[in-house]
Image (tube, rainbow, N blue to C red):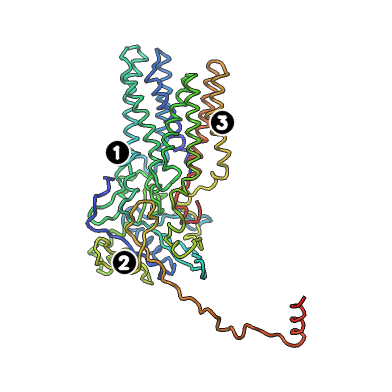
Amino acid sequence: MHPAPSVIVFTVLSGLGFGFLALLGIFGAQGMAAFFLWGIGYGLAVAGLVASTFHLGNPQRALLAFTQWRTSWLSREAWAAVITLLLFAPQALSDWLGLGWGRGFGIAGAGMAGVTVFCTSMIYAQIRAVPRWHHWTVPCVFLAYALSGAMVMGAMRPFAAWALVLLGVALALHWHFGARAFARAGATMESATGLGRIGAVSVFEQPHTGGNYLLREMIFVVGRKHAERVRMIAMVCSVMLPALALMFLPGVAAVIVAVTLHLLGALAQRWLFFAEAEHVVGLYYGAR
Amino acid sequence: MTALPERTEKKLGLVIDLDTCVGCHACVTACKGWNDQGYGVPLSDQNPYGADPSGTFLNRVHSYSVQPVDAAAQIINFPRSCLHCEDAPCVTVCPTGASYKRAEDGIVLVNEDACIGCGLCAWACPYGARELDQDAGVMKKCTLCVDRIYNEALPEEDREPACVRTCPTGARHFGDFADPQSKVSRLTAEREGFALMPEMGTKPVNRYLPPRKKDRPEEASLLAPLLDIKATGLAGWLDRVLGKI
């Protein structure tokens, strides 16, 4: 699949933003620090959501995306995101101005933040035509990124390390099952064309000499060439180095280094998530 | 609504005969021609006369070489377009309700006025039936020529999809699969019509008819008596000597 920058930025930033908001919702902050921390959380989440509209062909109609929550995960994600952001608002206000409204809104918002990230992951995990995505490890990876990213940002030292370990395990499982997903789905050139009953199928001639939307959008081969290396970068940057930075560097420097590296790793992982995912339509072109 | 109808009254669709398709691309041209001026925005082209032309098509004809175990390879032309699936994943993923399946005849359509061009339906389709128009930013797909098949302004013989109407070899058939007596249902039954990628669980409506069995060439070549050449003279001597070494 074509790794569109807007979608990579959307899933990474909104995941991190909602994770951090959830953390603030549960543990809170006080005074001006609360203002800035809640601001960062809201900024990340909203920036991600705004980025998601950049790849739309007709973004002026984006509000229609709230109508089909009964069937569409994308629509559910839109609702979950808005509800979450609204739930957190009174909590942020209470933290900032010291209104003492308890943590009810924050805890409810944290739950909804989890639901939002889950909905985001289901936009991809629901797609059967991309076998690598159609797997329970996809929500696991998205949720683990939100959780560990939030803990790293919050510099919650013992928990952050455990969350990063969890992320590492989720990534390893996702890659393990991902490598076998296409074969397990059972789609082949023979089943795609139905000509397997005669013999082995190969492409004699492509339908057009030029490129097309399908080839550009679904059949992206460049990513797989460097998949191993990008996987390495993702694992080292988003899991190992942030854990080391939090353990060995002092104070705020540790957080800045850890968050930057973690974000870099997350972007690499998300780029690969799209770039190495193979759509079954590639079979019609003898490519994957 | 992007919920799929429980059942549809009719199941309109195509039968494509891979035995008679000669790969002339007339259906591709007719489709593009009609749908440039019919339902929804035209099918745009990008850089059509330049070095890297590209465009939106609702129907594309592939050509495959199929190699049986014990016979010569066959070339099979393979038109690919929307299969109007009963369990269409492109419909349920749509966040705006632009993508829908009609309860009355089962045609899968896009309401372009509600389409935000997110492309998720094209991702959800295993068959590559949907293409995002690069000029208009809305999703385009086969409509089964919904603006022809019910159009009383057209003579009756023209009330079928443009690809079917134009096919010079009669390799494309249009009809109602819900009616067991319809031409498409009978053709499917007689010729063992099959669905594409059933493992994707989409329950396609369209059916493809497999190529008929090819004649096998006679076991012994007609030229057999002439092929066993006996050399004479010097060549014959050489042949014998070299054969012994």
The residue drawn where x is 31% and y is 51% is: B87
Q: Which subunit holds the residue at mark 1?
A: A
Q: Residue furthest front?
A: B244
Same subunit: marks 3 and 1: yes
Relative to A160, is A53 above or below? Answer: below
Nearest to N terminus: mark 3 or mark 1: 1
Q: What residue is drawn where x is 74% and y is 78%?
A: B243
Gap between marks 2 and 3 measured at Cα: 58 Å
Dot 2 corresponds to which residue?
A: B189
Residue B67 position within the rendered picture, expressed as x and y whole percent measured from the top left: 51, 65
> What's the residue type where badge 2 is placed?
Ala
Q: Can residue B39 be seen from the camera position used here?
A: yes
Amino acid type, residue under disc 1 in the picture: Trp
Same chain, labels 2 and 1 = no
Residue A192 x %, y %: 43, 57
Which one is in front in this view, the residue at disc 2 or the one at disc 3?
A: 2
Q: Which mark is residue A69?
A: 1
Tell me which chain the residue with mark 3 is part of. A
Distance from disc 2 to disc 1, alpha carbons, whole Å, reads: 40 Å
**Disc 3 residue type?**
Val
Q: Secondary structure at mark 2?
A: helix
Q: Residue B199: percent from the left, percent from the top?
A: 39, 52
* Residue occupied by mark 3: A236
Discs 2/1, front = 2
Q: Is residue A86 above or below residue A201?
A: above
* Local SS, label 1: loop
Q: Secondary structure at mark 3?
A: helix
- Please indicate whether residue A136 sits to the left or right of residue A260 in the image: left
| 10 Å crowding of disc 1: few (<14), some (14-19), many (20+) | many
Both labels 2 and 3 in a single chain: no
